Image (cartoon, rainbow, N blue to C red):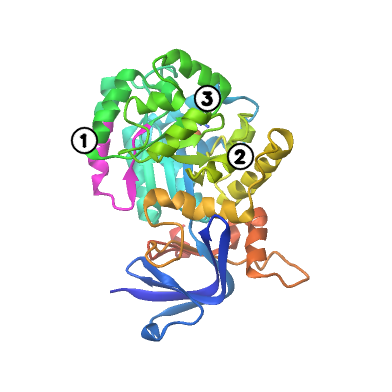
Amino acid sequence: MERFAIRGHICYSEDQKKIRTVDQGYVVCEDGKSRGVFETLPEEWRGIPCRDYGDKLIIPGLVDLHVHAPQYTFRGLGMDQELIDWLNTHTFPEEEKYKDTEYAKKAYHIFIEDLLHSATTRACVFATCHKEATLWLMEKMEEAGLAGYVGKVNMDRNSSEGLQEESAQKSAKDTEAWILEAADLTNVKPILTPRFIPTCSDELMEKLSELQKKYQMPAQSHLSENLSEIEWVRQLCPKASCYGDAYRLHGLFGGDCPTIMAHCVYSDEEETRMMKEQGVFIAHCPESNANLASGIAPARRFLDQGLKMGLGTDVAAGTSLSMFRAMAMAIQCSKLRWKLQDQSLPPLTVEEVFYLATKGGGEFFGKVGSLEPGYEFDAVVIDDGILRHARELSTKERLERLIYLAEDRQIDAKYVKGKQVLPIEKNCR
Ligand code: GUN
Ligand code: FE
């Protein structure tokens, strides 16, 4: 049995309304799982190895529920268009390049290094429709010590000739081969990834549904992000009662298929009810929704109605891999929505966004996103010493300030499933 403890100023989310802080506390790890947070180390564990991080903060690893690895190359560029034009002008031409596995390796290497040095311990990643490059990304993420799901994207219509797959059959065949080849990985798992309804024919969705049942796979996609997109889906899929129903008709909308849907900016009452009934996870991506002028999702309503939800960076519609930035944007956008659009939905709080970035998104992985007993030991140690201040701050205030001001260089150590993945040996970089 492997046991150790780390010591510092510990913060974690008890629930949506409460952050627990323990100053100079201990969190004990046993075989990759937390045994809990303690003010003093319990008698039975005196003498186990303990690393004292002094005045630094210790938080659960952050969970990015929605990010596109191949889009990291053009982050911060081309932010002058809305969704469909942005896909056609910037996204599809870039993703096309990943059929060249050498290019993909160069690009994914940078993505992985930057993700490793962020506070994110788990991510749900879209790759491209290219099998080889996607497998390479998964293997290297696992080698780096990261955990999560990665999807080989499926798309057989309405995209560029050079990118979209030649038929539903070929797309499904490649997907099955990829699922089998990825089966050896332990911490980075495959997830079915139909890009969104406009780029996936009914035939393809049916084939993915068969694979879902055969391999008991989870799924991820996009939902109700943009008004033109929603209108397009209405035309493409007249049988569906709403956009979400177009996935549900093919068994790819929660229920027996654990599912993440990114955005949900315009999900109406019916779609929201369907997501709740089916246990669909919402990936709320406020920065992306601002950059593509998509709108502001009613995150407050989803939280109050008890939907499952986490935060996503959605790089490269979002510019940054920082989940702190996603938390800050979630608060800021909810304030604008409240002031300008709907005064019945008050802004999100620090407690709520910290919950979403940890326990809320972490639930998709099981017991992830907390330091409470039984949770997988994903932890990040942060040195906020470079943020100078003239008065004493409580641990809770230090966390609150990091939401707005954290930088990757403040991350001192990172653990995933009990294994320390940062810092890495200098000569490994
Ligand atoms: N909808 C379909 N594909 C994409 C994508 O790559 N990014 C975003 N934000 N929305 C999408
Ligand atoms: Fe996306």
Q: Disc 3 vs disc 2: Cβ atoms closer than 8 Å?
A: no
- 115 left or right of 367? right
Name the foreground residue: 26 vs 413: 26
User: Would the CB of label 3 be found within 8 Å of ligand 1?
Assistant: yes
Q: Is residue 101 above or below residue 422?
A: above
Residue linked to disc 3: 87
Q: Which residue is mark 1?
A: 214
Q: Amino acid at mark 3?
A: Leu
Relative image position of residue 266 (x, y in whole percent)? 56, 29
Q: 366 or 53, which is in the foreground? A: 366
Disc 2: which residue: 287
| Up-down relation of residue 41 to residue 240 (above or below) | below
Between marks 3 and 2 in the image, the one whose residue lies nearer the viewer: 2
Q: What range is drawn magenta here?
A: 174-193
Instruction: Select label 3 or label 1 by which is in front.
Output: 1
For disc 3, the neighbor class at 10 Å (few under 14, some 14 to 19, many from 20) is: some
